């Protein structure tokens, strides 16, 4: 009987342990000359081992007239609470990937949460980590 009551109490607490956060993503630095047909690609990473390899989730937002002045704002819904990192880029030609030149340097605008920047490559997960709270904003400036 005691075990049954304990199990019931733990199951009642489960929703509290897995709450999701709705966060406003504010992006600036979009290439306004390449907005027509472009999308904003957002990858959410929760594990350092998966950083820039296997996102927890991927989101795609069509860019249109609302992206005036190179800025775009969108609410990211149901983000997992706790530390996470974002990687995003403007897919100017809507081919679903970040295009790079022959040297491996991105030719489409890209950025990371915390405006993290790496040296001779992408930043580390720890540099881009944010802990989202419902109602907060995450601002990213694209390079």
Image (spheres, helix red, strand yellow):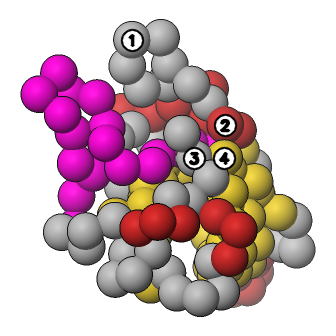
What distance separates the C-alpha of mark 4 from that of mark 2?
Answer: 6 Å
Residue 53 sits above or below residue 67 on the image: above
> Is residue 107 within the magenta segment?
yes
What distance separates the C-alpha of mark 3 from that of mark 4?
Answer: 4 Å
Horizontal side, residue 137 vs residue 53: left or right: right
User: Which residue carries the number 4 mark?
Assistant: 141
Quadrant of the image occupied by residue 41: bottom left
Counting from the top left corner in percent of width and height, residue 141 is at 66, 47
- Disc 3, disc 4: CB below 8 Å? yes
Disc 2 crowd, CA 10 A, few/some/many (<14, 14-19, 20+)? some
Q: Upstream in the sequence, badge 1 or badge 2? A: 2
Quadrant of the image occupied by residue 34: bottom left
Q: Upstream in the sequence, badge 1 or badge 4? A: 1
What distance separates the C-alpha of mark 1 from that of mark 2?
Answer: 16 Å
Closer to the eye: label 2 or 3: 3
Horizontal side, residue 38 vs residue 79: left or right: left
Q: Nearer the viewer, residue 51 or 8?
A: 51
Residue at 22%, 48% in the rendered image:
99
Residue at 68%, 50% in the rendered image:
140
Q: Is residue 103 visible?
A: yes
User: Which residue carries the number 3 mark?
Assistant: 142
Q: Is residue 82 visible?
A: no
- Disc 1, disc 4: CB below 8 Å? no
Q: Which residues are magenta?
A: 96-113
Q: Which mark is residue 120?
A: 1
Disc 1 crowd, CA 10 A, few/some/many (<14, 14-19, 20+)? few
Residue at 68%, 76% in the rendered image:
68
Counting from the top left corner in percent of width and height, residue 15 is at 69, 81
Magenta span: predominant SS is loop
Residue 64 sits above or below residue 34 on the image: below
User: Which residue carries the number 2 mark?
Assistant: 115
Q: Nearer the viewer, residue 22 or 31?
A: 31
């Amino acid at each position: 009987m005691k075990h049954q009551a304990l199990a019931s109490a733990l199951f009642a607490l489960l929703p509290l342990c897995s709450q999701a956060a709705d966060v406003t993503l504010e992006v600036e630095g979009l290439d306004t000359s390449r907005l027509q047909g472009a999308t904003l690609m957002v990858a959410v990473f929760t594990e350092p081992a998966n950083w820039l390899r296997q996102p927890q989730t991927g989101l795609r937002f069509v860019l249109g007239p609302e992206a005036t002045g190179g800025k775009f704002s969108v609410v990211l819904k149901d983000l997992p609470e706790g530390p996470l990192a974002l990687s995003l880029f403007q897919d100017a030609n809507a081919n679903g990937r970040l295009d790079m030149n022959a040297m491996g340097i991105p030719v489409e605008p890209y950025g990371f949460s915390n405006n993290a920047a790496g040296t001779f490559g992408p930043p580390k997960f720890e540099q881009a980590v944010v802990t989202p709270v419902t109602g907060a904003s995450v601002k990213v400036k694209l390079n």
